């Protein structure tokens, strides 16, 4: 009873705060979904509970709050984008006189759920693009369809971010900072192994062949984050898609992990461990950091990473020469990439939507997209901004452009909820505890139950 009473109190608060006049039954449904979501995920990241981001996040210390104490509040989930958006906020204030407060929550998902339930949500969020459908479906995001359609460059957006920014044929977010999965390889190791450093593997057969030649007593040919659900979705998803598979059906109502296409992709990485011995037998314990460090410390020759790592290559951050390429596909023709990164959205509860959209539009400008994002490895979300001085002489950015063309991402209202059964299945297969078919079939059954809820 207490939980239901608390929900009613929150609904009443949201109703009074909501100037758009949402009906009580819609708000009650929204709050119920939010509270269930918080209970499901809110305790996962912080053992001691969570605090609203306005208490735990880092604010832009140079912000000048307006006389009435109000400023646009923007939450940024990725530390890599915090500096870019903070710089954008300063430039926006100089041009418009509208003050902006930039906050980096300790955990965007947890803190935003709490802020929504308490009525203390920010005006704008730069959020993981795969979570946009969920937040749009519960009414948390403002409909910006008319504003988006009025953009002169609306046709310049493409890839998974654009697909994920809509819900029921309406626009609830705008692509902001693409993050694309690509193959990175150590050119120095290629040369030592007698491989052409300018010809990375393009097919699965070549990937295995190269990995064998690159594996020595001290190094492995290929590594991945076998113990990280999000990392595996980002880096392994392209193998599934290029093999003709997918994680769910088109409607998102049923898992397809039991398909031969998905199982074929999983078998590829299992064989890397047990048949070809080019990947550590302990790979199921590697998280994102462990896998990345293995590559950066030259204990592994190849890995799939994202746009920020490409920025490290261009900026000469490593002690060896590295290259990047599209993730190998079965035929070397039909490639795929995980098109992740951040989308930017306005919260439905904001009472400053007009100014908020002005800031969103500013974040899509050449000043921010080119000068703010490219130096940290991201390419602009707008394809019409590809003709810029950063791209000249850096073929790595051309690879990211190609990756964006073949980029995609799962569209689901329960993306995070599929993580556990998905990772469990991979762990069983990578540890040799279950066959690939058995592991994927069990995961399908578990995910189907989640999707049916």
Image (spheres, helix red, strand yellow):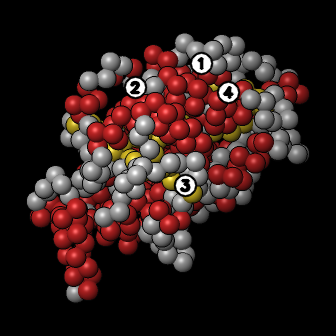
**Which of the two labelled residues, at mark 3 and mark 1, occupies the earlier sequence position?**
3
Q: Residue at x 25, y 25 (%)?
A: 149
Q: Which mark is on residue 398?
A: 1
**Gap in angstroms between the C-alphas marked 3 and 1:** 35 Å
Pointer 3 residue: 59
**Which of the two labelled residues, at mark 3 and mark 2, occupies the earlier sequence position?**
3
Residue 166 percent location from the top left of the image: 29, 38
**Count of numbered circles in the view:** 4
| Mark 3 residue crowding within 10 angstroms, few (<14) / some (14–19) / many (20+) | some
| Mark 4 residue crowding within 10 angstroms, few (<14) / some (14–19) / many (20+) | many
**Eyeballing the image, is 111 above or below 195?**
below
**Left or right relative to 203: residue 130:** left
Q: Quadrant of residue 442?
A: bottom left
**Eyeballing the image, is 66 above or below 26?**
above
Say which of marks 1 and 4 sits in front. Answer: 1
Q: Which mark is on residue 324?
A: 4
Pointer 2 residue: 158
Q: Which mark is on residue 83?
A: none
Residue 133 percent location from the top left of the image: 32, 47
**Left or right relative to 187: residue 330:** left
Q: Residue at x 65, y 22 (%)?
A: 396
**Which of the two labelled residues, at mark 2 and mark 4, occupies the earlier sequence position?**
2
Secondary structure state at the residue bearing disc 4: strand
**Which of the two labelled residues, at mark 4 and mark 3, occupies the earlier sequence position?**
3
**Gap in angstroms between the C-alphas marked 4 and 3:** 35 Å
Secondary structure state at the residue bearing disc 1: helix
Q: On the rendered image, what quadrant is the N terminus found in?
A: bottom left
Q: Residue at x 32, y 68 (%)?
A: 118
**Gap in angstroms between the C-alphas marked 3 and 2:** 32 Å
**Gap in angstroms between the C-alphas marked 1 and 2:** 15 Å
């Amino acid at each position: 009873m207490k939980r239901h009473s608390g929900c009613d109190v929150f609904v009443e608060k949201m109703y009074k705060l909501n100037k758009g006049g949402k009906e009580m039954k819609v708000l009650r449904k929204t709050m119920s979904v939010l509270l269930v979501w918080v209970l499901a995920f809110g305790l996962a990241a912080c053992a001691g509970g969570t605090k609203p981001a306005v208490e735990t996040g880092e604010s832009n210390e140079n912000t000048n709050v307006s006389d009435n104490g109000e400023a646009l509040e923007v939450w940024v989930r990725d530390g890599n984008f915090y500096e870019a958006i903070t710089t954008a906020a300063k430039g926006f204030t100089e041009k418009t006189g509208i003050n902006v407060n930039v906050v980096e929550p300790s955990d965007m998902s947890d803190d935003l759920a709490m802020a929504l339930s308490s009525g203390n949500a920010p005006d704008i969020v730069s959020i993981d693009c795969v979570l946009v459908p969920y937040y749009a479906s519960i009414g948390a995001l403002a409909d910006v369809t008319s504003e988006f359609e009025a953009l002169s460059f609306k046709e310049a957006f493409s890839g998974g971010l654009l697909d994920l920014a809509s819900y029921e044929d309406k626009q609830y977010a705008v692509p902001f900072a693409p993050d694309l999965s690509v193959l990175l390889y150590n050119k120095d190791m290629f040369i030592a192994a007698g491989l052409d450093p300018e010809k990375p593997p393009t097919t699965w057969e070549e990937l295995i062949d190269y990995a064998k030649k690159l594996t020595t007593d001290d190094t492995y040919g290929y590594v991945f984050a076998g113990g990280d659900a999000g990392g595996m979705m980002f880096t392994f998803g392209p193998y599934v898609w290029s093999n003709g598979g997918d994680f769910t059906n088109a409607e998102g109502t049923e898992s397809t992990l039991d398909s031969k296409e998905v199982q074929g992709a999983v078998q590829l990485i299992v064989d890397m461990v047990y048949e070809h011995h080019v990947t550590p037998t302990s790979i199921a314990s590697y998280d994102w950091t462990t896998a990345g460090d293995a590559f950066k410390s030259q204990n592994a020759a190849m890995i799939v990473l994202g746009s920020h790592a490409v920025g490290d290559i261009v900026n000469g951050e490593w002690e060896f020469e590295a290259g990047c390429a599209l993730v190998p596909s079965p035929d070397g023709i039909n490639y795929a990439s995980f098109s992740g990164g951040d989308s930017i959205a306005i919260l439905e509860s904001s009472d400053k939507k007009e100014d908020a959209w002005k800031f969103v539009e500013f974040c899509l400008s050449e000043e921010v997209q080119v000068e703010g994002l490219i130096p940290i490895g991201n390419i602009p979300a707008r394809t019409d901004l590809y003709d810029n001085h950063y791209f000249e002489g850096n073929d790595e950015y051309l690879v990211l452009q190609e990756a964006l063309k073949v980029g995609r991402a799962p569209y689901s209202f329960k993306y995070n909820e599929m993580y556990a059964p998905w990772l469990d299945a991979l762990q069983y297969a990578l540890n040799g505890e279950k066959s690939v078919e058995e592991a994927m079939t069990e995961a399908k059954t578990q995910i189907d139950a989640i999707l049916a809820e």
